[in-house]
Amino acid sequence: TQLLEQSPQFLSIQEGENLTVYCNSSSVFSSLQWYRQEPGEGPVLLVTVVTGGEVKKLKRLTFQFGDARKDSSLHITAAQPGDTGLYLCAGPRISRLTFGEGTQLTVNP
Amino acid sequence: EPEVTQTPSHQVTQMGQEVILRCVPISNHLYFYWYRQILGQKVEFLVSFYNNEISEKSEIFDDQFSVERPDGSNFTLKIRSTKLEDSAMYFCASSEEGGRTEAFFGQGTRLTVV
């Protein structure tokens, strides 16, 4: 059983489309972090959400933390080929980060 | 911008050999971590390190593995007697505080055991 479930696992869209990916858990997290990872590289931190119901925007990316702090979503507006990558959510557990399996996003020109 | 640096970027070793993966965390960070990612799989926690001792380790981190902070800047992961299944990307990360704060990752070391 995964502590953090991400969906969809794979997503292939055309440039200009909007999309939402999800990160869900049955457990409450004090915060959730979103990372983007490209092949052969380390995860790069995009944002941390801390407060239930919080919404953070990073250019065309909108991150939301669920009211109960058990889930989060990432919405991308007008996706571009440069958004292609593996999007990972991660939550703290004791002194570690627990990662979801990620959503592999491909944006086709 | 401060970053976590890892060396080497790629290490090929024969089964049974020992390898040492090196990391320089961000200078004002106090918590250090090793994670690994087997090709096509999720990022898995190995160990966290604070105040010169292990604060948490996963079931993967058995006696084959050890970590050390030999000086004020380096953080190393040693894998003794490597096995084929140790082949993976190994990521070092650091954070200002414990697991509840943002962790910044290095570019990784690709370990290939042959």
Image (cartoon, coloured by chain):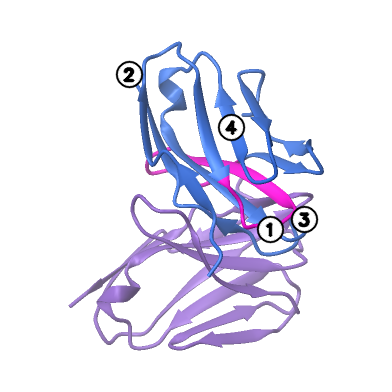
Q: Chain of mark 1?
A: B
* Picture residue at 53% right of the left edge, 60% below the top: B3
Q: Which residues are magenta?
A: B24-45
Q: Is residue B35 magenta?
A: yes
Q: Which residue is mark 2?
A: B114
Q: Which chain is blue?
A: B
> Label 4 to label 3, Cα distance in Å?
19 Å
Q: Which residue is mark 3?
A: B98
Q: Which residue of the protein is positioned furthest toward the front in this rendering? A: B71
Q: Chain of mark 3?
A: B
Front disc: 1 or 2: 1
Q: Which residue is mark 1?
A: B95
> Label 1 to label 2, Cα distance in Å?
33 Å
**Can see residue B44?**
no
Going from N to C along the chain, the mark reached first, 4 or 3, is 4
Q: Which residue is mark 4?
A: B77
Tag 3–tag 1 contact (CB < 8 Å): yes
Residue A22: x and y in percent read: 52, 69
Residue B89: x and y in percent read: 43, 40
Q: Residues within 10 Å of mark 2 (few under 14, many from 20)?
A: few
> Label 3 to label 2, Cα distance in Å?
36 Å
Q: Residues within 10 Å of mark 1 (few under 14, many from 20)?
A: many
Secondary structure beneath disc 3? Answer: loop
Report whether mark 4 lies on the same chain as mark 1.
yes
Secondary structure beneath disc 4? Answer: strand
Front disc: 4 or 3: 4
